Amino acid sequence: ATPEYGKQKFLERLEREIRQTKERYPEAAYVGIADGAESNWKFLNQHTQTQILDFYHASGYLGVVAEVLYPNQSAEQKEWLNQSYHQLKHEVGAAQRLHTQMLELAKQEGLSKTLRENLQAAITYYHNHQHQMHYSQFRQQHYPIGSGVTEAACKTLIKQRLCCSGMRWKEKGASIILSLRALILTSTRWEQSPRHQTSVQVVGVEAQNFLVSLQEYRFGSVSVTKSDLAPQAL
C-alpha cells in the first residue's frame, strides 16, 4: 500500500478544491452530507450552507425501535420500518416524531440491557441531528440526502484500479495512475484550472516515463497505450 497523506494533509487538499470550486461557481448552493461523526460537521460547517445527515445512517437507528415495539415479530418489525423510512424521507417533522416515540419507549420496564443501550444511542443520535434530518424539505430543494454517490466514486476511481489481486503500489506510481484515471472518468477535470494545460503536460511526461517499458496499461473499461500518454494527446 502507498503511504497515506494523513488526515490534515487530506483536509488541506480538500479545502483547496472547495475554494477553487467556489471561485468557479460562486452562485451555487453548497451542501455537506455526512454521518454523525463530530469532526465531519466541524469541517462542513465552515464550507457549506446546508448540512444533511446521511439518510442511510439516520434510518439505520430505527431497527432497535422496531425491536422494542414488536419483540420477536419480524413481519411487524419490517412493516413498521418500511413505513417509518417512508415517513422520514417524505413527511415534514418525521424525525422529531420518531425521537418523541423513542423517548416514550425508553420509559418501558423490562427492556434488556442491550436493547436499552441501543435505544438510548438512537435517542441521542436523533437528538443531536434532528436539525440535519429535514429530508422532505431537502428533497423539494433537489438536494441529495445520501453520501453513497461520493463513496461509490471513491471505489470506482481508486479501489477498482489499485486494489486488484496481487497489486502493490508506491506513492508516485499510484499518483500517476490515479491522475490519469481521474482525467478519463471526469472529462472536464483539467478545464477547472487555468493552468490545466501545464498540469496535463507534467502528468503526461511522468506517465510516459513511468510506462516506458510497457506496451499497454488498462484500467476500468479504458485502454491507454504509451502513445496515448504523450503530453499532446492528453
Image (cartoon, rainbow, N blue to C red):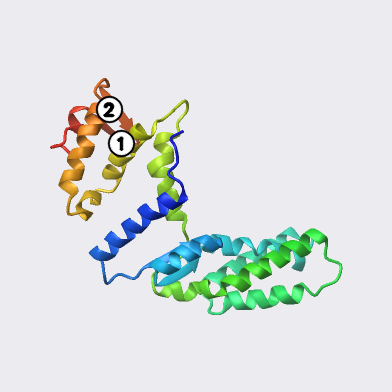
Q: Separation of disc 1 and disc 2 at Cα?
A: 8 Å
Whether residue 144 appears in this view of the structure is: no
Give the mark, 1 or 2, whose residue is nearer the N terminus. Answer: 1
Residue pointed to by mark 1:
176
Q: Tell me if residue 215 comes above or below residue 85 in the rendering.
A: above
Q: Position of residue 175 (x, y in %)?
A: 34, 38
Q: Position of residue 69 (x, y in %)?
A: 75, 68
Q: What's the residue type where badge 1 is placed?
A: Ile
Q: Position of residue 12 (x, y in %)?
A: 38, 54
Q: Tell me if residue 195 comes above or below residue 71 in the rendering.
A: above
Which disc number belongs to residue 210? 2
> At 56% across and 79% down in the image, what residue appears?
93
Q: Are marks 1 and 2 in contact (CB under 8 Å)?
A: yes
Quarter of the figure with the C terminus: top left
Q: How many marks?
A: 2
The answer to whether 184 appears left or right of 120 in the picture is: left
Task: Label 2: state its secondary structure.
Answer: helix
Question: Which residue of the protein is positioned furthest toward the front in this rendering?
Answer: 8
